[in-house]
Amino acid sequence: MSDAYIHDPRVTIEISKDEMSAFVILSEDTQLPPMNEKTLIAILTHNTIKEVFIQKDKILQIIKNPIYGEKILVAKGKAVIPAEDGKVKYLFKKETPDVGSLDEQGNIDYHARSTIITVSENEKIVTLIPPQKGVPGTTVTGKTINPGKSEEKALPSGKNVAIAPGDPMSLISTINGAVKIIDKAHIEVEPIILVKSDVDYSIGNIDCTGSLIIQGNIISGFTVQAAGDIEVHGVIEDSHVSAGGNVTAKGLVGRGEGFVSAGGSVIVKFAENHIIQAQKDIIVHEYI
């Protein structure tokens, strides 16, 4: 084929910046012989476009029904599929809602909100998703697009967790307790103490190394401390309450002698006459 056909003035070729697409713009010229499919393909390949990426159906359509002055897609490269790093998948709900649940009347029950996420002994709590190798791509000009490398993730470690029997890609909890993500590399499960009544003279002061759920109230004059979270389904009266994690309660009531502190957040429906300290947020849903 002659250079006259290779450098046909009726054909302008444009290649996208990423070289993943090629276009032609046709100009009408009755002085030249009609163009055929092979001629147009030859012009494209002469201009560095690989024939394997030329869309032959588009070429045939252009020859049969030429459209002049418009950019027409005639070649498309092979898209790269990027490599994906492995992932750490937590098999429990990591975040609690900002508000409580709806009651039968449609009102929000704020003290139904819990910041303690419980898991059972031998329950799988974390699993690894393996990395995925990528697939190289190719531009219309034949350049290879590197998909990149993928990296494996490691299982986190921590207290009261272990590799799942028969599944080295997963972790289980070794106790019944409250699960906490410490950081990307550490997770732990704390024991939970459940108090099914008020904290009063029948219970006494509490100091525990895990998390604490109190289904009643904390009566004035008592001290409750926990290294983890403290969840009170009732109210906290004039008492001293301290948690390494979050403190949640229906409310705080008293005569100004109550003290609540949290290494995380303090979340209550209402608060009256209490000193509140928190390393993170103090959230009072209704009134102070």
Image (cartoon, rainbow, N blue to C red):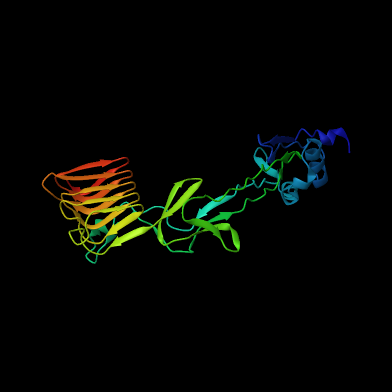
Q: So how many labels did they put on this image? A: 0
176 or 151, which lies in front?
Answer: 176
Q: Residue 55 appears at what percent x and percent y? A: 73, 48
Question: Viewed as shown, does residue 184 lie left or right of 215?
Answer: right
As drawn, the residue found furthest toward the left would be: 255
The residue shown at (79%, 43%) is 41
Screen quadrant of the C terminus: top left
109 or 37, which lies in front?
Answer: 109
Question: Viewed as shown, does residue 21 lie left or right of 283?
Answer: right
Does the image show residue 154?
yes
Q: Quadrant of residue 279?
A: top left
Q: Residue 20 appears at what percent x and percent y? A: 68, 41
Q: Quadrant of residue 12?
A: top right
Question: Viewed as shown, does residue 100 lie left or right of 220?
Answer: right
Vertical arrangement, residue 201 with respect to residue 137, above or below: below
2 or 279, which lies in front?
Answer: 279
Screen quadrant of the N terminus: top right
Question: Viewed as shown, does residue 144 lie left or right of 39?
Answer: left
As drawn, the residue found furthest toward the right would be: 1
Q: Residue 272 appears at what percent x and percent y? A: 15, 47
Does the image show residue 114?
no
Q: Residue 202 appears at what percent x and percent y? A: 19, 62
